[in-house]
Image (cartoon, rainbow, N blue to C red):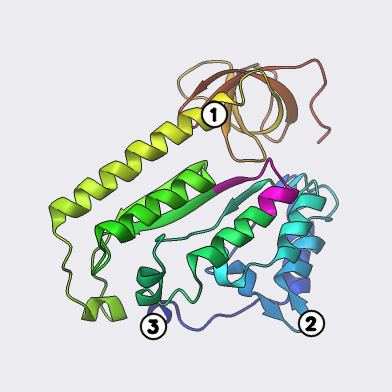
Amino acid sequence: MPYTRGREVSREAENILREARALAAQGAREIWLLGQNVNSYRAGEWGFCELLDAVSQVSGVLRVRFTSPYPNDWNNALSDLMAARKTICNQLHLPFQSGSDRILGLMRRQHTIEEYLAKIRYMRAINPGLELSTDLIVGFPTESDADFERTLEVLREVRYSLVFPFKYSPRPKTKASEMPDDVPLEVKDERLKRVIELQQQIDGENTARYLGSEQEILIDSASTKERGTMIGRTDGFYSVAVHEPSLEIGDLVPVRITEASGHWLRGEVLGAAPAAI
């Protein structure tokens, strides 16, 4: 909503790189690039692909993440870069909002669902381990049963690792607010329930495939419930708990996954020593 956020402004690339280098020098091991629409970044000759490439090569940085890109501005060059650069995490949040082209048009999303899925299929073909998350809305004005079923079809095809579903509610000064909020609340509730149930099934199947696998996790916190247990994340953004009191925040350690529940994993540290700080 530009009236709330104002016009997009891109920081100079060297300003961002200078900050990334300074943070790495102070001990930061993971850098997040944040923006309302990060992949529309443009500063002089720099686009987002060039910026992401440069940040991913800053000395001392072990991982780079970014949020949130806009599907219409995503391209195969970005997918290629993510697959090629080890420091760029194997995780992407790419909202699709609705599986219906008609609803996407009413939302002014400027792309079709087939265009969106073609980008997903390409990145999965060159980078099978990529973990995807998304946002979606149920009950947008005039959404029919057929429109909603198409949303479920997208969930079944893409099999996101994390979904943030919302029931539509009018926001002032948006085009949608001028439309009648004509999907009954009970229908919105039922559709949201079906999304959650389907995603819970997919979550269980997604996490189960990690059992027995070896992963690298970056330790980012200590458990508040289990003394001596540290929490880290895979580059796909799954949380992994390991009972190893000697670990410190910032350690990058190899683990074997021993348990899986929902979006949480538990593992055991393998013999290799933590990456040097």
Neighbourhood count class around disc 3 (C-alpha, 10 Å): few under 14, some 14–19, many 20 upward:
few
Report, in whole angstroms, how far the alpha carbon at label 2 lies from the one at label 3. Answer: 28 Å
> 27 or 135, which is in the foreground?
135
Is the residue 265 above or below the residue 165 in the image?
above
Q: Secondary structure at mark 2?
A: loop
Q: Secondary structure at mark 1?
A: helix
Q: Position of residue 220 (x, y in %)?
A: 61, 35
Is the residue 16 above or below the residue 248 in the image?
below
Query: Badge 3 is on which residue?
Result: 3
- Per the rendered image, the range of residues in magenta is 123-132
Q: Position of residue 182 (x, y in %)?
A: 16, 68
178 magenta-colored: no
Query: Badge 2 is on which residue?
Result: 45
Is the residue 260 above or below the residue 114 in the image?
above
Q: Position of residue 229 (x, y in %)?
A: 57, 19
Tag nearer the camera, 1 or 3: 1
Choose the circle earlier in sequence order: 2 or 3. 3
Quadrant in the picture for residue 206: top right
Q: Amino acid at mark 3?
A: Tyr
> 8 or 222, which is in the foreground?
8
Query: Badge 1 is on which residue?
Result: 207
Q: Amino acid at mark 1?
A: Thr
